[in-house]
Amino acid sequence: MVGKDPVAYLQDAFNRRHIPVRVAALVNDTVGTLLAHAYNNPDTVMGVILGTGCNGAYIEKIDKIEKWKSQTPAKEMVINMEFGAFDKERAILPLTMFDNKMDRKSVNPGKQLFEKMIAGMYLGEITRNVLLNLIDRRLLFQGNVTADLNQMWTFETAYMSTIEADNSPTLHATRKILESTLNFPSTSLNDRQVVKTVVELVGKRAARLSAVALAGILEHTGAWKQKSAIGIDGSLFEYYPSFDSDIMDGLEEILGAEVRQNVRIGLAQDGSGVGAALCALLAAKHNTV
């Protein structure tokens, strides 16, 4: 498929089956998010997905794309990065034994390692692995575990959001998850505080690693030195407490205080769908000219 037009192949498949659909455009969700955010924010330089998975797309100058060999009057192109696949060689990312354990048991071991450290599909499982390690060392729940927590993928990232937002004196919401959902007979306040700390660490690491991906593009393009916007779609960014502020803290630590003044990150809700519609509209108008 390299060098081929996937839209033409998709249209041909519809035609062969006599399905009355005309394909105007085929759009990656990150590209759609970029377009949707740019519709209201012309300074948008990047579209990002931070949800069940993670990825990003940005605007690049044609003369900087070494792999591009064709001729085009365009001076810029949107690049879909697929940055969730970064470091398949396992040479750079600070992988822990908890990441490695989760990766080995995943449906795609050794792949999408960066995504597995960031995305909502995996954060709960990483947290579960940390909790089990503390239990095995008798540092949590007096060394006791439930059948529910012993099962893979039972500690959902949604639980992390609830626990992270739980600032009650007794951590009541955390207790409800541990005792009513994961079926611990009882938990001490100290147990709940430890669980909350683990959740906060895993969540903050995910946000700051997300900031690394964004900072790389901002540095590459120089966009952080001027007024720029980044549109982000996905449940993790939308619902996880302090994820946006943790990203900005990470960007500032990497690029300096100026980035906070120049770069705005914002929610592009349903950006992939809205952006795809915008792209289809533009493609349809272009084809009628």
Image: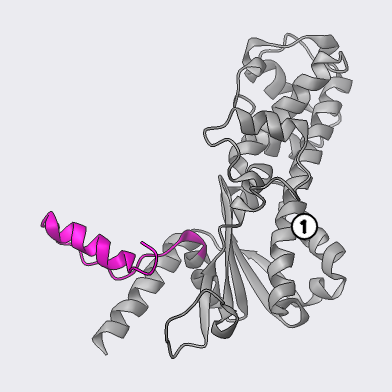
Snapshot colouring:
one colour
Looking at the rendered image, the quarter that the N terminus falls into is bottom left
Is any atom of residue 80 visible in this view? yes
Q: Position of residue 279 (x, y in %)?
A: 39, 73
Residue 82 vs 285, above or below: the answer is above
Task: Look at the numbered disc 1 and give the secondary structure of its residue.
Answer: helix
Q: Position of residue 175 (x, y in %)?
A: 75, 22
Q: Residue at x 76, y 31 (%)?
A: 97
Residue 199 vs 138, above or below: the answer is below
Q: Residue at x 58, y 43 (%)?
A: 111
Q: Is residue 221 magenta?
A: no
- Around disc 1, counting alpha carbons within 10 Å, would you say few (fewer than 14), some (14 to 19), or many (20 or more)? some
Image quadrant where residue 161 sits: top right
76, 131: nearer the viewer:
76
Q: Position of residue 156 (x, y in %)?
A: 62, 31
Residue position for label 1: 245
Looking at the rendered image, the quarter that the C terminus falls into is bottom left
Q: Amino acid at mark 1?
A: Ser
Q: Residue at x 14, y 61 (%)?
A: 15
Looking at the image, residue 68 sits to the left or right of residue 21; the answer is right
**How many numbered discs, if any?**
1
Q: Position of residue 145 (x, y in %)?
A: 73, 11
Numbered range of the magenta stretch:
1-30
Q: Residue at x 75, y 76 (%)?
A: 224
Looking at the image, residue 22 sits to the left or right of residue 46; the answer is left
Residue 141 vs 76, above or below: the answer is above
240, 124: nearer the viewer:
124
Image quadrant where residue 200 sits: top right
